[in-house]
Amino acid sequence: MQEQNEKNQKQIIPLTEQLKERKRDEKTTELKQLMKEVEDLSNSYQKLRNEIENKEKEQSNIRKQMNSTRIEYDKQIEILKEKISLYDREITRDSERRKKFGETGNLFQKGAKEFEKKIQQLEKELITVKKKILDLELGKEQFQMKIESVIEYRDDKLRRDWTYRVLTKYPEITNLRERINPLSRAISLASIYAGSKIGVKSLLTKTVVNQLIMQHYDFEGKSLISRYIENSTATLYPEVNLSESRLLLLLRMAIRDSETLYDLLMSGNNRKNISKEQQMNVIAGTIDEIGLEMIDENDLDIWKEPPDNPSNIVYHTAEQEEILQQLQQQDKQRESQQKPEKQRESHNKSEIPSLDLLHCANINKLVEKLTSDQSTVQYRNTFIMTYQSFMTPLQLLNKLKQRYNVPAKKEGEDEMTWKKNRDFITIRVISALKNWIETEFNDIDEKIVEKLKDFIRRVIKPEKERSATSLLNAIKDQREKREKQSLLRTTEQAPPPIVPKNIFHPKLSLSDICEEEFARQLTLLVSDLFRKIKPSELAKQQWTKKKPTGKVLNIVACFNKFNGFGRYIATEIVTPKTVKERAKAWQRFAKMGKHFLELSNFDSLMATIAGLSNNGVRRLKQTHQEIPKHFTKMFNEAKIIMDQKNGYHVYRERLEQARLDGPAMPYLGVWLTDITRISSGSSNTIKGLINFSKRKQLYNIISQIQEYQNLRYHFQSVYQIQMLLKRELPHKNDKELYKISVSREKKK
Amino acid sequence: MTSKFLTEVQQKVVVLGDFSVGKSSLILRVSKNEFLEEQESTIGAAFINFSVNVDNKPNQIQIWDTAGQEKFRSLTPIYYRGAIGAIVVYDVSREYSFQTAKEWVEELKEKANPKLIIALCANKIDLLEEKKKLLKEKEYADENGLLIYETSAKTGKGVTEMFVDFSKNLPKDQGREIFNDDFFEEEFFNIELHNGEKKTEKTICC
């Protein structure tokens, strides 16, 4: 066993060894293989590693690239952001712009509309321009016609050259031509406005023309020629005054009147704009003014007027019957004294009421009554004072002439009765004429006076010489009185004027004159103006009318002085710069007002009140506080006197009292209100008849005014002061005054 | 006037305007309801009293006329002082009278009582053609806050209506008792009064 074992062992050892070797071999190969594998692996590892490294490198590269690109992107993003914000801004701007554009768009639209309008206007203008062009073309034709006429004219020129040569050679001819020119103009004018053809023909009969020529020759001292004309034409030549040539006088008057008319027609370039009617009105106004006659075709001769009936005369009745009866009784008493004369109207005498109750009538009736036995003093005065409100002086003269020429005796009428009646009427006419001359002759045109004189000389004188001379004397007296009026002074000693020392200084001003003298001189001036106011101005209410000829009326002069003085006061008070000076000025005029009251010059007193109550003066409170109390009290009293309440009741009483005490200068406004009330309170005519009761009321006021016009102040007129006052007193208008006043004492 | 008026509260209204626009005729029409009648007009009345019922209360207005004295322009402040209403009249048939009316309105606005109620009265509309309408005048009245009336004193159209309507437009609290002398004290001489007791009811213009 062991041996076996050993043997086995021995056998085994090699085997094991073999085996071992084999195994080793195997192992080495295996190892080798493993080594190889390892090597491979390591190689591959290496490779991988390299790859990894490469990759990493790549990665890092990429990363780097990434980073750089990111930065770039970031940058780009920022840039984009900026851009976006920029865009945003631009968008906002854009929207704003859009808004703006929208507005401007609207504006443009409006503008477009306006343009359209303008275009339309322009189109219209174009049309007018086209029309104008047409007109111009027409004008061109006319112009051509004119050129043709100019050519004719050129032919004519030769003739004119000749006339020119002749005229320069013989200046007498030029002279004569110029003198004739107005006459020929008058003729052409008359032919255009053939106003009174019939009238002229009826007035200028052959006899009259012959008489005029004869009178002219007589005046020239060529009575032989005149006698010859008398014989050959068999016209009667009446004895007339030879102090002037009637023919020359008439011609001169005719030329003067025609010149006035011509000037009127030619004045101003706007003649074409005036309608013919208006032109005729203006002419009628002028004719009325210069006393020419417009023949009224409808005029009825006073003798053809039917007897009293409601269509031509109306009396007050019913409610005034009592007064009527009383007045009739009075009338009867008066009539008993003049009984023998009345014949014509005696049959219905008992029915005729007194003229004091006359309500309305037509012109013929009024004149008839004036010259009938019904006529009363009251009636005559009323008529003569107010007739200008319904007829012209010339009409009155004509009517009186008509009335004087009593128609010839009718058949079957008693010779004696007719003669008596005629005598009666002629006497009445003469007395009416005398009344007229004596009471209201101041404002009658010279020509009417001439006509009246002519009538007296030609018609009245041959029959009733005494009354004719008395009438002529009355006219003469009136005229002389008119001239002398301004010189009239009483024997009574006037108080010596208080003149300042620098009275002869050329720079004498109104503020140098003391209040009392100022008041006196202004009173003189104002009362002179007042006295010049004519009844006809009042009767016709002329101050409310604009006259075509621009003649300044006396009444307007009164207004102007009044307003001027009032504003002068206000100006003098407001202008000084210190309160004290203003208060002093205020006191000066208040004192003046006191003097006016003492002089009973209510007109200037009222003007003073107006001046002190001017808006500019009244608002000066500081100034008013400086004024002593007694001054304001005085002013208050004056205001109460001139209070408008109760129709100037206080004033009217005071005025009446003042008239009894001495001269007075009334405030015109009160009467003007009365006159306005009367004229707007009732109509001028009633059913075509002249409203005579209205004239009676007017007469009442006018006679009142005349009473005051007869009064005069006895003061010595100081020439230098009068000159200062007569000029327009320095004054500012109300607006300026108010402005200055505000600048002096500010508004609170 | 008499004691009758002393107890009444009266409101003064002035009527102004160019000459011959028909101021007196308007007043005549409203006082007597007549125009150019044969009846004789009363002389000497400076104003008329006109009673209206406003809210069942009798209201006396005193209408002052400046007739015939239009040319005394320097007197006008005296007329409108103390008035609480003014009626400026113009004549529709005369263009110029409207210009004068405008001047009146301006003067009143500037210088008279600032609370003054002003009315523009287009008179003589009977002379106006039917087609014509007073557009320009109405515009002017609107601009200046004036009342406007159309009247015809001749036919009587709108006259009474104007005065009634105008008096209704007057402020009711402004009117005063009138005493003959105190009226003047108060109206014109407020300076004096202020030295002593002050009167509260007084409204001073300017």
Image (cartoon, grey):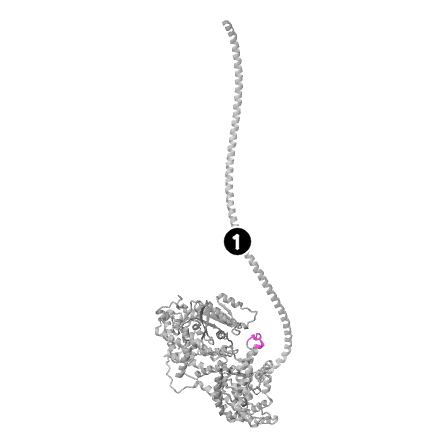
How packed is label 1: few (under 14 Cα within 10 Å), some, or many (20 or more)? few
The structure residue drawn at horizontal position 53% and vertical position 21%, both measured from the top left corner, is A37
Quadrant in which the C terminus of chain A appears = bottom left
Write the start and end of the magenta stretch as one range: A268-277
Q: Position of residue B114 (x, y in %)?
A: 43, 67
Query: B57 or B203, which lies in front?
Result: B57
Asked if the stretch drawn in magenta spans residue A274, the answer is: yes
Question: Along the line of sight, which residue is nearer the eye, B130 or B54?
Answer: B54
Q: Chain of mark 1?
A: A
Can residue B200 be seen at all in this image of the molecule? Answer: yes
Q: Is residue A721 visible?
A: no
Q: Is residue B158 above or below residue A74?
A: below
Residue B76's spot in the image, x, y percent?
Answer: 44, 73
Give the answer, above or below, for where A355 lies relative to B48: below
Say what secondary structure mark 1 lies in.
Answer: helix
Is A616 displayed left or right of B133 in the figure? left
Res A362 → quadrant: bottom right
Would you say the magenta stretch is mainly helix, strand or loop?
Answer: helix
Q: Tell whether A409 sits left or right of B63.
A: right
The residue that label 1 is drawn on is A100
- Give the image location of residue A695, x and y in percent: 50, 82
**Residue A41 is one of the magenta-drawn residues:** no
